[in-house]
Image (tube, rainbow, N blue to C red):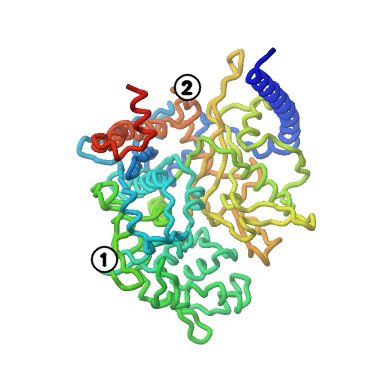
Amino acid sequence: MPSQISKTLGNYRDALDDSRNRYEQMKKERFKNAKQFYDSFFKNLIKKYDTKNFNRVKMLAEQLFQVDKVRFAAVDGSCYKKQLQNYMVFFGAAYPIRGIIDLSRSDKKFVYEPWSPDEDVSMVAYVPIPFAELNEMMDEPFVVSDDQRINLSNIHLQLMELAEVFQAYMLVKSSDLRPKVLLWDQSMSSVMNSNDVNYKRINLIGYKYQMRSLTAQDVIIAYSHPYNERLDIPSKKKYRAYNYVLWKIQENSPRSISSLAKELKLSEKELLRRINYLISENVEQGDLLTQNKPIAYISGDELYFNEDYVGSWEYCIGLFEHICKKLFKEKKPNALVYKKKNLEGRAEERWTSPDDLKFLISIGIRALIEECWKHNVLLIGIVKDSASRYLTRNYIGVMDHIGKYKDVPHVLLPWSDRDFLETLPWISDSLMTPWSTIEFDSVFMTLHIEKGEDKNKRILGVRGKIISPPERLFARSLAQFYLNRSKKSMLYGHVIFIDRLLIPSIDNNIEKVVIDQNKHVLGVIEPIVFLNKNERNGVQDLMMYILDILTRNLYPEVIGYPDPLHKADWGAKSLYKKIKPIIDSSDISLRSNPAHKTFRQMRDEIKRT
């Protein structure tokens, strides 16, 4: 008689076989749909590149870079956390690689530039946080509220992201180190979205720097950035319409309320409601409520910018640099501890919270964007893995809904953009690398189609009205850089996800599409579009040429991935390998006292011996 456990294992095997068979059947059906979708529609959204014909792209490179020898840099990071008996240790680091591409040569070669021994370019932070100290910072010893509950689970990831953005920012800011092309192992649009935290949750408000304290008004002004006249950023959509107003009144104060309402296509009453943050004295200061001077004030029909906040954005950048230098360069043990006054007016120490770190990352990415615009730096984000469907569901769905695409097959495709695009070499024998999809606005990360209870389709954002990041800021695409059909079995690298910052001096003439079908909720949204492969996009062509040069395909584990980012990853991982044993040995001092160990720890140690 078979035992009960063998029956259980047999039932599991049968269930697994059944699930695998069903999955394979679904996969075959989706592949057929993918072929139909590509042949009848999607092939017009695929750009094939002949990188041997470089004349037109070289002209654009000369216009943008103004040099033949183009310096590039790549930034990647690593992180780690270790939970000990009485405290946690977090580690975050970023490391840059640099080199030069000689565009005057036809052999598509580049060389790396080593850092000199006296150049400490890595960004490293290791922060031990005692649980006891965190508990002592609670205002009420017997009460735990949402405001007091500190989530430590992802601080090491945030430290790494902050290290990366600070590294990228310092490279672009430095005239000696500044690259013309900067690769970052992140999606900039995702970084902006994931670190967008309400100013009311930022406890860093009240942090004293340069003889004054950070205010909620400073945070509101900082979040309104980046500004760019040529790209018309901030945009006029309803979500955070006050960002547009802030930009305009700083640019030219005063501004007529009626003219601003007309520009935003809002009534004056609704405009005043939406800019209440700007004209109110009572703005929450993190965990405090204080009266500060408003950012703007009204006189008659005119809206004036308060000149007390003229240097607010520069102040926030200075605060970002100050904290990051203490954390990553000076490696001060108290870099994430600061003093601020509580409700009773007494100064108390605080740990920088996860929301505070998000705010610093948000300042960093905005400062990086404006520095790249200032110096014409081509900023490119690369993501290796994603299960997103921003192209095949969000972008094509919205374009189909507003009538920009005709006869789009409504079929079920493979489960993600990557799954679908990696079937294309099997569908089209003529597809050779490098190839890319057309670029689409990163606003389609959140802008999508939903079907309501009334079965009608509507264009919406997250929670209906939230549209982020701003349109006309980043262009997204997917590309493949390795495909070998010469072997018996086709060899290919993964499709990678590319995010690039739009360049105002070149991209300002890109066609825009007006999306106003749901303007009573969203307002008017105007993303950039390249509807098909025939629409000219010189910066994407230049970017693809550069990425093709930088993708050497020497390492099978990252085939089809830019080589500098792989080497930057090596550098960051080497920092991690050096620091990890030190962190892991942090509890040696506790081993002499068994009372500091749990029963489980003592039992496991006895078993090992």
Residue type at the position of mark 2: Pro
Spatial distance from mark 1 to mark 2, Cα to Cα? 51 Å
Which of 136/463 is in front? 136
Q: Which mark is residue 556?
A: 2
Quick one: quadrant of the N terminus? top right
Reading the image, the residue beneath label 1 is 210
In the displayed structure, 63 sits above or below 583; it is below
Residue type at the position of mark 1: Gln
Query: Please, which residue is most extreme toward the bottom here?
Result: 300
* Quadrant housing residue 595: top left
Q: Is residue 45 visible?
A: yes
In the displayed structure, 461 sits above or below 80; it is below
Where disc 1 sits, the SS reads: loop
Mark 2 neighbour density, 10 Å: few (under 14) some (14–19) many (20 or more): few
In the displayed structure, 415 sits above or below 510; it is above
In the displayed structure, 425 sits above or below 67; it is above
Which of 120/179 is in front? 120
N-term-proximal mark, 1 vs 2: 1
